Image (tube, grey):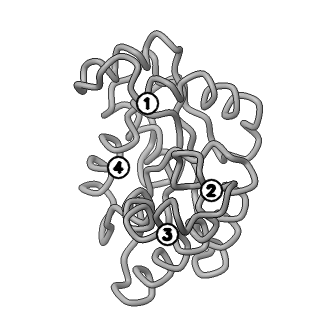
């Protein structure tokens, strides 16, 4: 089983993934940002193609493929369920990754966590981000893309009034591991 948790930076994806890891048996967290950090170190600006020089490692051409290759190897080698927290707003990338994941694991759930701009700003400040940093710069773009393309997700969860624990209960309910007791699920 693969549980993808998407949404803007600061929405609570990593916090949710940590709780879900404890609740979903035989699971690990796989964060594709690690693949991006590796590529950023290997593929310097002198090597990058012009369209890859955006400051976003997801624009490096091999990122999406390596993201799915690593996921496949984690599942095949370690026989674990994957919980994947990641902000992937580009719909073409998102569809590519989802299809590739479904090729080697037929049980893929894809959630998008959303909240108002104000809620996200408060959460980013609470986690110690500096106003104006990369996550803040991405809020509007991410919210616009996620709202406009909500049909690509199995479930969109509005998290403004939900705690991380409540978000996880909604996710667990959607993947049929528990009954949900919150009306927003």
**Label 2 SS:** helix
On residue 1, the disc is 3
Q: Name which residue lies at 38% across and 26% down.
A: 133
On residue 81, the disc is none
> Could you tell me if the residues under marks 4 and 3 are in contact, i.e. CB atoms within 8 Å?
no
> Could you tell me if the residues under marks 4 and 1 are in contact, i.e. CB atoms within 8 Å?
no
**Label 1 SS:** helix
**Badge 3 density bin: few <14, some 14–19, many ≥20, Cα 10 Å:** many
**Badge 1 density bin: few <14, some 14–19, many ≥20, Cα 10 Å:** some
Structural distance between the alpha carbons of marks 4 and 2: 29 Å
| Foreground tag (1 vs 3) | 1
**Label 4 SS:** helix
| Foreground tag (3 vs 2) | 2
Which tag, 1 or 3, sits closer to the chain's start?
Answer: 3
Look at mark 2 in the image and give the residue it sits on. 52
Structural distance between the alpha carbons of marks 1 and 3: 29 Å
Structural distance between the alpha carbons of marks 3 and 2: 32 Å
Q: Is residue 153 above or below residue 64?
A: above
Look at mark 1 in the image and give the residue it sits on. 135
**Badge 4 density bin: few <14, some 14–19, many ≥20, Cα 10 Å:** many
Look at mark 4 in the image and give the residue it sits on. 17
Structural distance between the alpha carbons of marks 4 and 3: 14 Å
Q: Which of 176 and 13 is in front in this view?
A: 13
- From the viewer's perspective, is 24 left or right of 43? left
Which tag, 4 or 3, sits closer to the chain's start?
Answer: 3
**Residue lying at the far top of the rendered structure:** 118
| Foreground tag (4 vs 3) | 4
**Label 3 SS:** loop
| Foreground tag (2 vs 1) | 2
Q: In this view, does 126 lie above or below 80?
A: above
Which tag, 2 or 1, sits closer to the chain's start?
Answer: 2
């Amino acid at each position: 089983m693969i549980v993808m948790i998407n949404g803007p930076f600061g929405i609570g994806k990593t916090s949710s993934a940590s709780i879900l890891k404890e609740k979903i048996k035989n699971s690990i967290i796989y964060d594709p940002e690690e693949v991006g950090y590796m590529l950023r170190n290997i593929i310097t600006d002198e090597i990058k193609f012009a369209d890859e020089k955006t400051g976003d490692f997801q624009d490096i051409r091999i990122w999406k493929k390596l993201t799915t290759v690593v996921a496949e190897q984690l599942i095949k080698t370690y026989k674990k369920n994957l919980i994947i927290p990641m902000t992937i707003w580009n719909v073409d990338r998102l569809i590519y990754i989802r299809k590739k994941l479904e090729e080697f694991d037929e049980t893929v759930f894809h959630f998008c966590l959303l909240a108002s701009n104000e809620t996200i700003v408060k959460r980013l400040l609470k986690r110690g981000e500096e106003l104006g940093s990369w996550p803040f710069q991405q809020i509007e773009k991410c919210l616009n893309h996620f709202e406009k393309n909500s049909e690509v997700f199995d479930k969109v969860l509005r998290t403004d009034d939900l705690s991380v624990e409540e978000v996880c209960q909604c996710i667990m309910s959607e993947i049929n591991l528990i009954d949900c007791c919150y009306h927003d699920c």
